[in-house]
Amino acid sequence: MNSIEASELIINARGAVYHLDIRPEELADTIITVGDPFRVEKVSKYFDHIEHRSSHREFITHTGTINGRRISVVSTGIGPDNIDIVMNELDALVNIDFNSRTENKEKKQLNIIRIGTSGSLQPEIGVDSFVASTHGIGLDNLLHFYPYRNNEVESEMLRAFKTQTQFNPQLSSPYVTSASAILLAKLVDGCHAGITATCPGFYGPQGRNLRLGLAMPQLNDQLTAFRFGNLKITNFEMETAAIYGLGKMMGHHCLSLSAIVANRIAKAFSADADATIDKLIRQVLGEIQRDEG
């Protein structure tokens, strides 16, 4: 098997992967990802013990245990470009031998659960509620740099999305990805379930107009109106579709759970977003412990 060149997989002086600054033994098989670096501690404060801490740029990692279950929490920063870094480096840590720089013969599957914030696109999904993303529709272009293959349902959903929204191809070529059915079944309780649109930015790509105007001023209305069978676009954010697509190709189980802090239809924002996020964190950690039992 060919060795991966030093320019392709960068390993630092302490034997850790470049951006995350983690060594293979410092990562658990169950991983919670959060966008905000300061949210890492909001998760790990519930650990019984923290065995490892690392910090490099926006990437902070805490690995520890809760009731005997080993968990890592990793901050990704914002956007699909950061997800490209995080997902590739997490996979490298468990599926590449850092000494020989070759792929491991036996591949490991990670459980990767995103806990993030999001804006609702449906009037009935109010602030301070939770959404489990069954699918991601990527309005960025990240996955087109990889040989992703849609299944039949994803292909049909993509065709329906392009037809119903008349999405401007000059903005991007949308793609569709899916959650891990295994994780979705375990962690969907108490959540709305639906499609999440992943945007490449916070302002114009999510229909926020400050001074520049918008190329697609009706985009949010079109996203809200989209239907695919009994599914609709419940919310949008900036990471889910990329996590699902890369995770599927790498063989990992991925699920995105969002705390709704804004309802874009009602023009409302949570009065206590921190409390809502903390409630979702505690719910996820509780489900992880029950699953171990």
Image (cartoon, grey):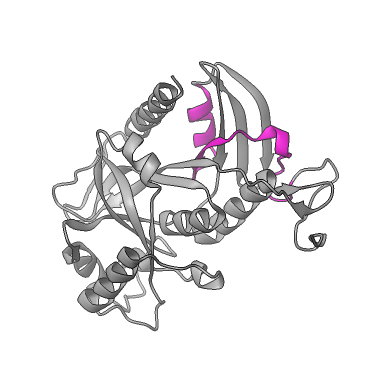
Frontmost residue, 126 versus 9: 9
Which image quarter is the N terminus in? bottom right
Residue at position x 38%, y 29% in the image? 278
Residue shown at 29%/51% (left/top)? 119
Query: Looking at the picture, how far across and down is residue 245, in whole percent?
Result: 47, 59
Left/right of residue 264 with respect to residue 257 in the rendered view: left
Furthest toward the bottom, the residue is 170
Q: Is residue 207 magenta?
A: no
Q: Position of residue 218 (x, y in %)?
A: 22, 73
Q: Nearer the viewer, residue 64 or 61?
A: 64
* Vertical position of residue 223 compared to residue 101: above or below: below
The quadrant where residue 277 appears: top left
The stretch in magenta equals 17-45
**Above or below, comparing residue 205 to residue 110 in the picture:** below
Q: Quadrant of the C terminus?
A: top left
Can residue 208 be seen in this snapshot?
Answer: no
Q: Residue at x 50, y 72 (%)?
A: 144
Query: Which of the pair 164/177 is nearer the observer?
Result: 177
Q: Position of residue 222 (x, y in %)?
A: 21, 70
**Residue 123 placed where, x, y %?**
14, 51
Instruction: Kindly indicate the quadrant of the structure image that contains residue 227.
Output: bottom left
Indicate whether residue 32 is drawn in magenta: yes
